[in-house]
Image (cartoon, rainbow, N blue to C red):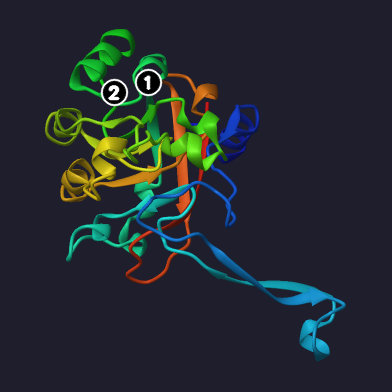
Amino acid sequence: MKTMTEVLAFLRNSTWIDLTHAFDKNIPHSIFFQPEQRTTLYHYDEGIGTLGAGILAHEYKFVGQYGTHVDPPSHFVRDGRSVDEIPIQEMVLPLALVDISARAEVNPDTELTKADLILWEEKNGRLPDDCFVAMRTGWSERWPDKKAMQNADPNGTLHYPGWSLEALEFLAQERSVIAIGHDTTDTDCGIVATKYQAPVEDFWLKQDKWQIEMLCNLDKVPSSGALILCSWAKPKKGSGFPARCIAIF
């Protein structure tokens, strides 16, 4: 049994990768929602009275699904768990990274398939129990260009990768996976999101699972052997919230 001092020394000597985009009103975001609005209430010497003297305070208005964010089951499921009901034990998990970026560069409509997951297991061993599976498509490298992220054709159809239903059925029913994440704005591929539909995300959240959208720096993370720490604010019965995610290995 390692002592807490030994555990801290191990963590401090590990590699830490921030998987989170900073957000403001200009970032790419889902076509379903409006951009952030931020009001400066107090600005150092411009404040009013004692409360405003020497401080900076902002008021924020944004949809819970903004920037790098968590989607709990309640995002789609009436009686599903909300962000405050996800236990902290689920917020630090083994991380498995499946990289389909080479294929996505050639075919932006590609989906991560069950075959991709089987191939990952052939190379890395069976997916760890109670893990987090992240899909890297390379799309975060287009950030913060909204047009590049949406990749719309002249007819307005969006073209970016997503998860396939068969892949998430495999993760939910044949493996013990707690959560998933990806570097795109949606779980479903762009051509589906264009229709204002989300059948794959709907399936996943209905399994009492959660997810993180719009991750970044996945190119800096190994396929296996890392931990992911995901944290967010705790609004009661919240349907989603910007998250801070970190990979440690």
Residue type highlighted by circle 1:
Ala
For residue 230, above or below residue 87: above
Q: Residue at x 51, y 23 (%)?
A: 219
- What residue sits right under mark 2 in the picture? 110
Q: How many marks?
A: 2
Q: Image quarter for residue 184?
A: top left
Q: Nearer the viewer, residue 193 or 216?
A: 193
Considering every residue shown, the one lying at the far right of the view is: 45
- Label 2: few (<14), some (14–19) or many (≥20) C-alpha neighbours in 10 Å: many
Q: Position of residue 91 (x, y in %)?
A: 40, 47
Q: Nearer the viewer, residue 94 or 156?
A: 156
- Please tell me the numbered disc located at residue 104: 1
- Please tell me the numbered disc located at residue 142: none
Considering every residue shown, the one lying at the far front of the view is: 154
Residue type highlighted by circle 2:
Thr
Q: Which residue is drawn at 59% across and 55% down?
A: 24
- Label 1: few (<14), some (14–19) or many (≥20) C-alpha neighbours in 10 Å: many
Q: Where is residue 88 in the image (x, y as percent from the top left)?
A: 39, 53
Q: Where is residue 144 in the image (x, y as percent from the top left)?
A: 57, 40
Q: Is residue 14 left or right of residue 52?
A: left
Q: Which residue is drawn at 17% across and 44% down?
A: 199
Q: Position of residue 61 (x, y in %)?
A: 52, 69
Q: Verify CB contact (< 8 Å) between mark 1 and mark 2.
A: yes
Q: Is mark 2 on a helix, strand or loop?
A: loop
The answer to which of marks 1 and 2 sits earlier in the sequence is 1
Q: Is mark 1 on a helix, strand or loop?
A: helix
- Determine the CA span between mark 1 and mark 2: 6 Å
For residue 144, above or below residue 74: above
Q: Image quarter for residue 236?
A: bottom left
Q: In this view, does 244 lie to the left or right of 108?
A: right
